[in-house]
Image (tube, helix red, strand yellow):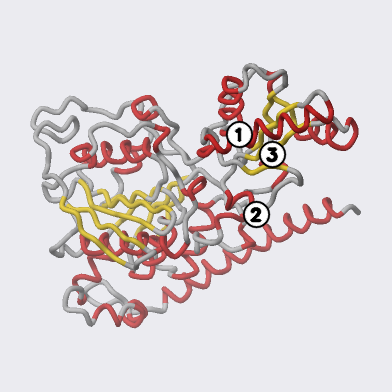
Amino acid sequence: MSTDTYESELIAEITELRALLHTKEIELAQLRYKKQVSQEYGLNNNEICRYSRQLFLPEIGVQGQKKIKDSSILIVGAGGLGCPAALYLACAGVGCIGIVDYDDIEINNLHRQLLYTEANIGTAKVIAAAESINRLNSYVKVVPYKIQLNSKNAMDIIKNYDIVIDGTDNVATRYLLNDACVLSGKPLVSGSALKFEGHFSVFNYNNGPCYRCIFPIPPPPETVTNCGDGGVLGAAVGIIGVLQALETLKIILSMSDITSGRLLLFDGTETKFHNVRLRPKNPDCAICGEHRVIHELIDYEEFCGAKANDKEPNLNLLKKEERISVEEYNQIVKIDSKPHILIDVRSPEEYQICHLQNSINLPFTQLNKDHNLKLIKDNIKKVQEEHHSVDLYLMCRRGNDSQKAVQYLKKILAEETLEIRDIIGVRLVSGCL
Protein backbone atom coordinates (compact mmCIF):
# COMPACT_ATOMS: atom_id res chain seq x y z
CA MET A 1 0.00 0.00 0.00
CA SER A 2 1.38 3.40 -0.99
CA THR A 3 1.87 6.15 1.56
CA ASP A 4 -0.72 8.35 -0.17
CA THR A 5 -3.34 5.57 -0.12
CA TYR A 6 -2.72 4.83 3.56
CA GLU A 7 -2.94 8.54 4.38
CA SER A 8 -6.28 8.80 2.55
CA GLU A 9 -7.64 5.79 4.44
CA LEU A 10 -6.49 7.23 7.76
CA ILE A 11 -8.16 10.56 7.00
CA ALA A 12 -11.42 8.79 6.11
CA GLU A 13 -11.30 6.69 9.28
CA ILE A 14 -10.55 9.71 11.47
CA THR A 15 -13.41 11.63 9.84
CA GLU A 16 -15.84 8.83 10.69
CA LEU A 17 -14.56 8.60 14.27
CA ARG A 18 -14.79 12.36 14.68
CA ALA A 19 -18.41 12.34 13.49
CA LEU A 20 -19.21 9.53 15.94
CA LEU A 21 -17.49 11.41 18.77
CA HIS A 22 -19.46 14.56 17.96
CA THR A 23 -22.73 12.61 18.03
CA LYS A 24 -21.89 11.05 21.40
CA GLU A 25 -20.89 14.42 22.84
CA ILE A 26 -24.27 15.84 21.83
CA GLU A 27 -26.05 12.89 23.44
CA LEU A 28 -24.07 13.37 26.65
CA ALA A 29 -24.82 17.10 26.72
CA GLN A 30 -28.54 16.47 26.21
CA LEU A 31 -28.54 13.86 28.96
CA ARG A 32 -26.91 16.27 31.39
CA TYR A 33 -29.27 19.05 30.35
CA LYS A 34 -32.33 16.93 31.23
CA LYS A 35 -31.00 16.50 34.75
CA GLN A 36 -30.82 20.26 35.35
CA VAL A 37 -33.45 22.20 37.27
CA SER A 38 -34.41 25.51 35.68
CA GLN A 39 -35.05 28.48 37.93
CA GLU A 40 -37.94 30.87 37.41
CA TYR A 41 -35.68 33.38 35.64
CA GLY A 42 -34.71 30.88 32.92
CA LEU A 43 -31.28 29.64 34.05
CA ASN A 44 -30.64 26.14 35.30
CA ASN A 45 -28.25 25.13 38.08
CA ASN A 46 -25.46 24.24 35.66
CA GLU A 47 -25.71 27.62 33.92
CA ILE A 48 -25.67 29.44 37.24
CA CYS A 49 -22.45 27.65 38.21
CA ARG A 50 -20.90 28.11 34.77
CA TYR A 51 -21.55 31.85 34.55
CA SER A 52 -21.26 32.64 38.27
CA ARG A 53 -18.20 34.87 37.94
CA GLN A 54 -19.96 37.19 35.51
CA LEU A 55 -23.30 36.89 37.30
CA PHE A 56 -21.62 38.65 40.23
CA LEU A 57 -21.09 41.74 38.06
CA PRO A 58 -23.73 44.41 38.74
CA GLU A 59 -23.81 45.19 34.99
CA ILE A 60 -24.93 41.61 34.29
CA GLY A 61 -26.60 39.74 37.15
CA VAL A 62 -29.38 37.25 36.52
CA GLN A 63 -31.40 39.48 34.18
CA GLY A 64 -28.33 40.38 32.13
CA GLN A 65 -27.36 36.72 31.79
CA LYS A 66 -30.89 35.96 30.58
CA LYS A 67 -30.46 38.67 27.92
CA ILE A 68 -27.19 37.07 26.83
CA LYS A 69 -28.83 33.65 26.70
CA ASP A 70 -31.72 34.98 24.60
CA SER A 71 -29.45 36.81 22.14
CA SER A 72 -28.41 35.70 18.67
CA ILE A 73 -25.18 36.85 17.03
CA LEU A 74 -24.04 36.42 13.43
CA ILE A 75 -20.29 36.22 12.86
CA VAL A 76 -19.25 36.70 9.25
CA GLY A 77 -15.77 35.29 8.75
CA ALA A 78 -14.46 32.43 10.90
CA GLY A 79 -10.85 33.59 10.79
CA GLY A 80 -8.48 35.53 13.02
CA LEU A 81 -11.24 37.90 14.18
CA GLY A 82 -14.21 35.57 14.12
CA CYS A 83 -12.57 32.75 16.10
CA PRO A 84 -11.77 34.70 19.30
CA ALA A 85 -15.07 36.56 19.05
CA ALA A 86 -16.96 33.27 18.81
CA LEU A 87 -14.97 31.73 21.67
CA TYR A 88 -15.73 34.51 24.14
CA LEU A 89 -19.35 34.93 23.11
CA ALA A 90 -19.96 31.19 23.45
CA CYS A 91 -18.25 31.06 26.83
CA ALA A 92 -20.30 34.07 27.97
CA GLY A 93 -23.49 32.14 27.19
CA VAL A 94 -24.85 33.68 23.99
CA GLY A 95 -27.81 31.52 23.03
CA CYS A 96 -27.33 31.32 19.27
CA ILE A 97 -24.27 32.01 17.13
CA GLY A 98 -24.43 31.92 13.34
CA ILE A 99 -21.11 31.59 11.53
CA VAL A 100 -20.64 32.42 7.85
CA ASP A 101 -17.52 31.30 5.98
CA TYR A 102 -16.98 29.60 2.62
CA ASP A 103 -13.41 28.44 3.30
CA ASP A 104 -11.72 25.26 4.48
CA ILE A 105 -9.00 25.14 7.14
CA GLU A 106 -5.39 25.37 5.99
CA ILE A 107 -2.27 24.96 8.08
CA ASN A 108 -1.44 28.66 7.74
CA ASN A 109 -4.69 29.48 9.61
CA LEU A 110 -3.65 27.78 12.83
CA HIS A 111 -1.34 30.45 14.26
CA ARG A 112 -4.26 32.82 14.79
CA GLN A 113 -7.55 30.92 14.36
CA LEU A 114 -7.81 29.21 17.72
CA LEU A 115 -11.02 27.28 17.16
CA TYR A 116 -9.11 24.83 14.97
CA THR A 117 -6.45 22.16 15.42
CA GLU A 118 -4.11 20.27 13.10
CA ALA A 119 -6.72 17.52 12.90
CA ASN A 120 -9.17 20.00 11.31
CA ILE A 121 -7.01 20.80 8.27
CA GLY A 122 -9.11 20.36 5.14
CA THR A 123 -12.38 20.62 7.09
CA ALA A 124 -14.89 23.41 6.47
CA LYS A 125 -14.24 26.22 8.94
CA VAL A 126 -17.88 26.59 9.92
CA ILE A 127 -18.22 22.86 10.70
CA ALA A 128 -15.03 22.73 12.78
CA ALA A 129 -16.00 25.98 14.53
CA ALA A 130 -19.44 24.61 15.44
CA GLU A 131 -17.90 21.44 16.87
CA SER A 132 -15.33 23.39 18.91
CA ILE A 133 -17.94 25.76 20.30
CA ASN A 134 -20.28 22.93 21.26
CA ARG A 135 -17.44 21.22 23.11
CA LEU A 136 -16.88 24.44 25.03
CA ASN A 137 -20.53 25.12 25.74
CA SER A 138 -23.24 22.68 24.74
CA TYR A 139 -25.93 25.23 25.65
CA VAL A 140 -25.01 27.37 22.63
CA LYS A 141 -26.83 26.73 19.37
CA VAL A 142 -24.41 27.14 16.45
CA VAL A 143 -25.72 27.61 12.92
CA PRO A 144 -23.02 27.09 10.26
CA TYR A 145 -23.33 28.70 6.82
CA LYS A 146 -20.72 27.36 4.40
CA ILE A 147 -21.39 29.99 1.78
CA GLN A 148 -19.97 33.23 0.51
CA LEU A 149 -22.21 36.05 1.68
CA ASN A 150 -23.58 38.09 -1.22
CA SER A 151 -26.39 40.44 -2.17
CA LYS A 152 -28.79 37.55 -2.78
CA ASN A 153 -28.47 35.72 0.55
CA ALA A 154 -27.34 38.36 3.06
CA MET A 155 -30.74 39.77 4.04
CA ASP A 156 -32.32 36.35 4.57
CA ILE A 157 -29.51 35.35 6.93
CA ILE A 158 -29.02 38.62 8.83
CA LYS A 159 -32.72 39.03 9.65
CA ASN A 160 -32.46 36.07 12.06
CA TYR A 161 -29.86 37.73 14.32
CA ASP A 162 -29.70 40.63 16.75
CA ILE A 163 -26.13 41.81 16.08
CA VAL A 164 -23.66 41.21 13.24
CA ILE A 165 -19.89 40.91 13.70
CA ASP A 166 -17.72 41.63 10.67
CA GLY A 167 -14.68 39.37 10.81
CA THR A 168 -13.92 39.48 7.09
CA ASP A 169 -10.81 40.64 5.34
CA ASN A 170 -12.13 42.48 2.29
CA VAL A 171 -13.73 45.78 1.42
CA ALA A 172 -16.62 44.51 -0.70
CA THR A 173 -18.05 42.39 2.13
CA ARG A 174 -17.61 45.29 4.53
CA TYR A 175 -19.91 47.48 2.41
CA LEU A 176 -22.31 44.58 1.88
CA LEU A 177 -22.61 43.98 5.63
CA ASN A 178 -23.01 47.67 6.36
CA ASP A 179 -25.84 48.10 3.88
CA ALA A 180 -27.56 44.87 4.93
CA CYS A 181 -27.37 45.89 8.60
CA VAL A 182 -28.77 49.35 7.87
CA LEU A 183 -31.64 47.91 5.84
CA SER A 184 -32.28 45.30 8.57
CA GLY A 185 -31.84 47.69 11.50
CA LYS A 186 -29.00 45.66 13.04
CA PRO A 187 -25.83 46.96 14.76
CA LEU A 188 -22.57 46.07 12.99
CA VAL A 189 -19.45 45.41 15.07
CA SER A 190 -16.64 45.86 12.58
CA GLY A 191 -12.97 44.98 13.06
CA SER A 192 -9.76 44.70 11.11
CA ALA A 193 -6.15 43.74 11.83
CA LEU A 194 -2.86 43.72 9.93
CA LYS A 195 0.71 43.11 11.05
CA PHE A 196 0.90 44.33 14.71
CA GLU A 197 -2.06 46.70 14.40
CA GLY A 198 -5.83 46.64 14.45
CA HIS A 199 -8.95 48.73 14.85
CA PHE A 200 -12.66 48.32 15.45
CA SER A 201 -15.86 50.31 15.69
CA VAL A 202 -19.62 49.85 15.94
CA PHE A 203 -21.76 51.11 13.07
CA ASN A 204 -25.50 51.68 12.70
CA TYR A 205 -26.08 51.74 16.45
CA ASN A 206 -28.32 54.11 18.41
CA ASN A 207 -28.51 56.73 15.63
CA GLY A 208 -24.74 56.64 15.16
CA PRO A 209 -22.99 56.67 11.79
CA CYS A 210 -22.89 53.71 9.46
CA TYR A 211 -19.77 52.64 7.59
CA ARG A 212 -20.84 54.59 4.49
CA CYS A 213 -21.22 57.76 6.55
CA ILE A 214 -17.48 57.61 7.22
CA PHE A 215 -16.32 55.99 3.97
CA PRO A 216 -18.83 56.82 1.21
CA ILE A 217 -16.36 55.78 -1.51
CA PRO A 218 -14.35 52.53 -1.36
CA PRO A 219 -10.55 52.76 -1.55
CA PRO A 220 -8.75 51.86 -4.80
CA PRO A 221 -8.23 48.06 -4.82
CA GLU A 222 -4.48 48.41 -5.30
CA THR A 223 -4.17 50.28 -1.99
CA VAL A 224 -5.79 47.51 0.07
CA THR A 225 -3.57 44.91 1.77
CA ASN A 226 -4.85 41.83 3.59
CA CYS A 227 -3.09 39.60 6.08
CA GLY A 228 -2.31 37.09 3.34
CA ASP A 229 0.01 39.64 1.78
CA GLY A 230 1.00 41.99 4.59
CA GLY A 231 1.14 39.41 7.37
CA VAL A 232 -0.42 39.51 10.83
CA LEU A 233 0.54 38.51 14.35
CA GLY A 234 -1.99 36.12 15.87
CA ALA A 235 -2.04 37.88 19.24
CA ALA A 236 -2.74 41.25 17.58
CA VAL A 237 -5.73 40.08 15.56
CA GLY A 238 -6.90 38.12 18.62
CA ILE A 239 -7.07 41.32 20.68
CA ILE A 240 -9.37 42.93 18.13
CA GLY A 241 -11.58 39.83 17.97
CA VAL A 242 -11.90 39.76 21.76
CA LEU A 243 -12.79 43.47 21.79
CA GLN A 244 -15.49 42.79 19.21
CA ALA A 245 -16.92 40.13 21.53
CA LEU A 246 -16.77 42.52 24.49
CA GLU A 247 -18.54 45.29 22.59
CA THR A 248 -21.20 42.85 21.39
CA LEU A 249 -21.92 41.80 24.98
CA LYS A 250 -22.17 45.46 26.02
CA ILE A 251 -24.73 46.04 23.27
CA ILE A 252 -26.73 43.00 24.40
CA LEU A 253 -26.72 44.37 27.95
CA SER A 254 -27.68 47.91 26.79
CA MET A 255 -24.59 49.33 28.45
CA SER A 256 -23.34 52.86 27.83
CA ASP A 257 -20.11 54.01 26.15
CA ILE A 258 -20.45 51.78 23.09
CA THR A 259 -17.72 52.35 20.50
CA SER A 260 -20.11 54.03 18.07
CA GLY A 261 -19.03 57.28 16.45
CA ARG A 262 -15.41 56.55 17.28
CA LEU A 263 -12.68 54.24 16.09
CA LEU A 264 -10.49 52.35 18.55
CA LEU A 265 -6.94 51.89 17.24
CA PHE A 266 -4.51 49.33 18.64
CA ASP A 267 -0.75 49.49 18.08
CA GLY A 268 0.84 46.24 19.19
CA THR A 269 4.43 47.39 18.68
CA GLU A 270 4.03 50.01 21.42
CA THR A 271 1.06 48.36 23.18
CA LYS A 272 -1.05 51.50 22.89
CA PHE A 273 -4.74 52.15 22.36
CA HIS A 274 -6.09 55.34 20.80
CA ASN A 275 -9.67 56.53 20.36
CA VAL A 276 -10.42 58.61 17.27
CA ARG A 277 -13.65 60.56 17.11
CA LEU A 278 -15.49 59.88 13.85
CA ARG A 279 -17.81 62.16 11.93
CA PRO A 280 -21.44 61.98 13.10
CA LYS A 281 -24.21 60.36 11.10
CA ASN A 282 -24.22 61.87 7.61
CA PRO A 283 -27.67 63.23 6.64
CA ASP A 284 -26.67 62.81 2.99
CA CYS A 285 -25.51 59.19 3.38
CA ALA A 286 -26.58 57.04 0.43
CA ILE A 287 -27.92 54.24 2.66
CA CYS A 288 -28.93 55.77 6.02
CA GLY A 289 -29.36 59.47 5.17
CA GLU A 290 -32.56 61.50 5.05
CA HIS A 291 -32.80 61.06 1.28
CA ARG A 292 -31.28 57.62 0.81
CA VAL A 293 -30.66 56.45 -2.73
CA ILE A 294 -29.85 52.82 -1.88
CA HIS A 295 -32.97 50.84 -1.04
CA GLU A 296 -31.68 47.34 -1.71
CA LEU A 297 -28.37 45.53 -1.82
CA ILE A 298 -26.22 46.18 -4.90
CA ASP A 299 -23.31 44.47 -6.68
CA TYR A 300 -20.52 45.16 -4.18
CA GLU A 301 -17.73 43.62 -6.22
CA GLU A 302 -18.55 46.05 -9.01
CA PHE A 303 -18.92 48.94 -6.54
CA CYS A 304 -15.53 48.25 -4.92
CA GLY A 305 -13.71 46.96 -7.99
CA ALA A 306 -12.55 43.94 -6.00
CA LYS A 307 -13.67 40.41 -5.17
CA ALA A 308 -15.74 39.80 -2.04
CA ASN A 309 -13.21 37.40 -0.55
CA ASP A 310 -9.67 37.50 0.80
CA LYS A 311 -8.22 35.39 -1.99
CA GLU A 312 -5.63 37.18 -4.08
CA PRO A 313 -6.83 37.25 -7.72
CA ASN A 314 -4.63 35.58 -10.29
CA LEU A 315 -3.74 38.26 -12.80
CA ASN A 316 -3.27 37.50 -16.49
CA LEU A 317 -1.21 40.42 -17.74
CA LEU A 318 1.15 38.64 -20.11
CA LYS A 319 0.86 36.64 -23.30
CA LYS A 320 1.26 32.87 -23.11
CA GLU A 321 4.72 33.01 -24.66
CA GLU A 322 5.85 35.50 -22.02
CA ARG A 323 5.38 32.96 -19.22
CA ILE A 324 6.87 29.56 -18.44
CA SER A 325 5.94 26.88 -15.92
CA VAL A 326 8.05 25.77 -12.97
CA GLU A 327 8.74 22.50 -14.80
CA GLU A 328 9.95 24.36 -17.88
CA TYR A 329 12.26 26.48 -15.77
CA ASN A 330 13.60 23.35 -14.09
CA GLN A 331 14.51 21.99 -17.53
CA ILE A 332 16.28 25.24 -18.42
CA VAL A 333 18.39 24.98 -15.28
CA LYS A 334 19.13 21.25 -15.07
CA ILE A 335 18.98 20.00 -18.66
CA ASP A 336 19.44 22.84 -21.11
CA SER A 337 21.82 24.81 -18.85
CA LYS A 338 20.86 28.01 -20.63
CA PRO A 339 22.55 31.17 -19.32
CA HIS A 340 20.00 33.32 -17.56
CA ILE A 341 19.32 35.66 -14.66
CA LEU A 342 16.60 34.89 -12.09
CA ILE A 343 15.09 37.79 -10.14
CA ASP A 344 12.87 37.08 -7.13
CA VAL A 345 10.62 40.12 -6.55
CA ARG A 346 9.21 39.03 -3.16
CA SER A 347 9.90 40.89 0.07
CA PRO A 348 13.15 40.13 1.94
CA GLU A 349 11.13 38.36 4.66
CA GLU A 350 9.52 35.99 2.15
CA TYR A 351 12.85 35.48 0.39
CA GLN A 352 14.48 34.40 3.66
CA ILE A 353 11.84 31.72 4.22
CA CYS A 354 12.87 29.90 1.04
CA HIS A 355 14.44 30.82 -2.29
CA LEU A 356 16.17 29.33 -5.29
CA GLN A 357 19.93 29.29 -5.51
CA ASN A 358 21.55 31.98 -7.65
CA SER A 359 18.39 34.11 -7.57
CA ILE A 360 18.64 37.84 -6.95
CA ASN A 361 16.20 39.35 -4.46
CA LEU A 362 14.86 42.69 -5.69
CA PRO A 363 11.46 43.43 -4.11
CA PHE A 364 8.89 44.62 -6.63
CA THR A 365 8.29 47.82 -4.69
CA GLN A 366 12.01 48.63 -5.00
CA LEU A 367 12.50 47.52 -8.59
CA ASN A 368 12.42 51.04 -10.03
CA LYS A 369 15.24 52.30 -7.80
CA ASP A 370 18.29 53.43 -9.77
CA HIS A 371 20.70 51.16 -7.90
CA ASN A 372 18.50 48.11 -8.52
CA LEU A 373 18.14 48.87 -12.23
CA LYS A 374 21.92 49.30 -12.40
CA LEU A 375 22.37 45.93 -10.68
CA ILE A 376 20.13 44.24 -13.26
CA LYS A 377 21.92 45.88 -16.20
CA ASP A 378 25.34 45.03 -14.77
CA ASN A 379 24.35 41.38 -14.39
CA ILE A 380 22.97 41.27 -17.93
CA LYS A 381 26.20 42.74 -19.29
CA LYS A 382 28.33 40.30 -17.28
CA VAL A 383 26.46 37.21 -18.51
CA GLN A 384 26.39 38.50 -22.10
CA GLU A 385 30.16 38.95 -22.06
CA GLU A 386 30.58 35.31 -21.03
CA HIS A 387 27.83 33.66 -23.09
CA HIS A 388 26.82 36.27 -25.72
CA SER A 389 23.13 35.78 -24.90
CA VAL A 390 21.06 35.79 -21.73
CA ASP A 391 17.40 35.43 -20.71
CA LEU A 392 15.80 37.17 -17.74
CA TYR A 393 13.22 35.36 -15.56
CA LEU A 394 11.12 36.81 -12.78
CA MET A 395 9.31 35.02 -9.98
CA CYS A 396 7.20 35.85 -6.94
CA ARG A 397 4.81 34.17 -4.56
CA ARG A 398 1.58 34.29 -6.57
CA GLY A 399 2.75 35.30 -10.01
CA ASN A 400 1.12 38.73 -9.93
CA ASP A 401 4.03 40.99 -9.01
CA SER A 402 6.35 39.03 -11.28
CA GLN A 403 4.05 39.71 -14.24
CA LYS A 404 4.02 43.41 -13.41
CA ALA A 405 7.80 43.30 -13.12
CA VAL A 406 8.06 41.73 -16.59
CA GLN A 407 5.94 44.51 -18.06
CA TYR A 408 8.03 47.16 -16.33
CA LEU A 409 11.43 45.72 -17.29
CA LYS A 410 10.39 45.19 -20.91
CA LYS A 411 9.98 48.96 -21.13
CA ILE A 412 13.16 49.79 -19.23
CA LEU A 413 15.28 47.22 -21.09
CA ALA A 414 13.67 47.67 -24.50
CA GLU A 415 17.07 48.18 -26.16
CA GLU A 416 18.47 44.94 -24.75
CA THR A 417 18.33 41.79 -26.90
CA LEU A 418 17.01 39.34 -24.34
CA GLU A 419 13.87 37.41 -23.45
CA ILE A 420 12.10 38.57 -20.27
CA ARG A 421 9.59 36.08 -18.91
CA ASP A 422 7.58 35.26 -15.81
CA ILE A 423 7.59 31.88 -14.02
CA ILE A 424 4.07 30.55 -13.33
CA GLY A 425 2.91 28.65 -10.27
CA VAL A 426 5.79 29.10 -7.83
CA ARG A 427 3.37 29.04 -4.88
CA LEU A 428 1.88 25.76 -6.05
CA VAL A 429 5.18 23.95 -5.65
CA SER A 430 6.43 25.84 -2.59
CA GLY A 431 3.50 24.92 -0.36
CA CYS A 432 1.13 27.26 1.50
CA LEU A 433 3.40 30.33 1.48
Look at discs 2 and 3 and give the one toward the viewer: 2
Query: Quick check: 82 above or below 366?
Result: below
Q: Nearer the viewer, residue 61 or 346?
A: 346
Q: Position of residue 37 (x, y in %)?
A: 33, 79
Asked if residue 34 lies left or right of residue 265, the reply is right
Query: Quick check: 270 above or below 197?
Result: below
Under circle 1, the secondary element is helix
Residue underneath mark 1? 374
Q: Nearer the viewer, residue 284 or 372?
A: 372
Q: Nearer the viewer, residue 71 or 271?
A: 271
Residue underneath mark 3? 426
Give the amino acid at mark 2.
Ile
* Mark-to-mark CA distance, 1 and 2: 26 Å
Residue underneath mark 2? 353
Q: Position of residue 265 (x, y in %)?
A: 28, 57
Asked if residue 147 lies left or right of residue 390, the reply is left
Under circle 3, the secondary element is helix
